[in-house]
């Protein structure tokens, strides 16, 4: 199944409190529960003004629908072509 990186522009994301991050996560998980097992949230990276999320889903449309239902921005959705890491150099 394809993997996607979603860029969400959220001013002040890096300043969100643990409680706010928990609330956002709960909202996302609630939408995922209602959507079904075909879309999965793997993890997210919170930076200064953006959150980068990694999802597994059958298509980009499902990723965008998750964002719409959760009230999250999805400024960019990119399908991952491949993954590299230090072991790629071996």
Image: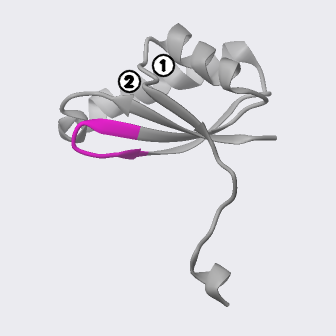
Mark 2–mark 1 distance (CA, rounded to whole Å)? 6 Å
Q: Is residue 46 above or below residue 30?
A: below
From the viewer's side, name the closer residue of 19 and 35.
35
Is 80 contained in the magenta span? no
The question of residue 50 being in magenta is answered with yes
| 45 w.r.t. 51: above or below | below
Read off the residue under disc 2. Answer: 23
Check disc 2 and report its element: helix, strand or loop: helix
The residue located at (64%, 82%) in the rendering is 87
**Where residue 6 appears, x then y in whole percent?**
51, 35
Q: Is residue 13 left or right of residue 87?
A: left
Residue at screen point 22% across, 35% down = 17
For mark 1, what is the residue? 27
Magenta span covers which residues? 45-51
The percent position of residue 41, horizontal first and vertical second, equals 61, 36
Mark 2, other Cα within 10 Å: few <14 / some 14–19 / many ≥20: few
- Element marked by disc 1: helix
Residue 47, given in percent of the width and then of the height, sits at 28, 46
Q: Is residue 7 above or below residue 45?
A: above
């Amino acid at each position: 199944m394809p993997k996607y990186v979603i860029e969400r522009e959220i001013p002040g994301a890096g300043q969100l409190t643990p409680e706010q991050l928990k609330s956002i996560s709960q909202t996302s998980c609630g939408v995922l529960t209602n959507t079904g097992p075909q879309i999965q949230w793997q993890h997210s990276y919170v930076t200064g003004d953006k959150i980068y999320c990694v999802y597994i889903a059958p298509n980009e449309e499902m990723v965008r629908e998750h964002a719409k239902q959760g009230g999250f921005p999805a400024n960019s959705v990119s399908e991952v072509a491949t993954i590299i890491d230090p072991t790629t150099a071996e």
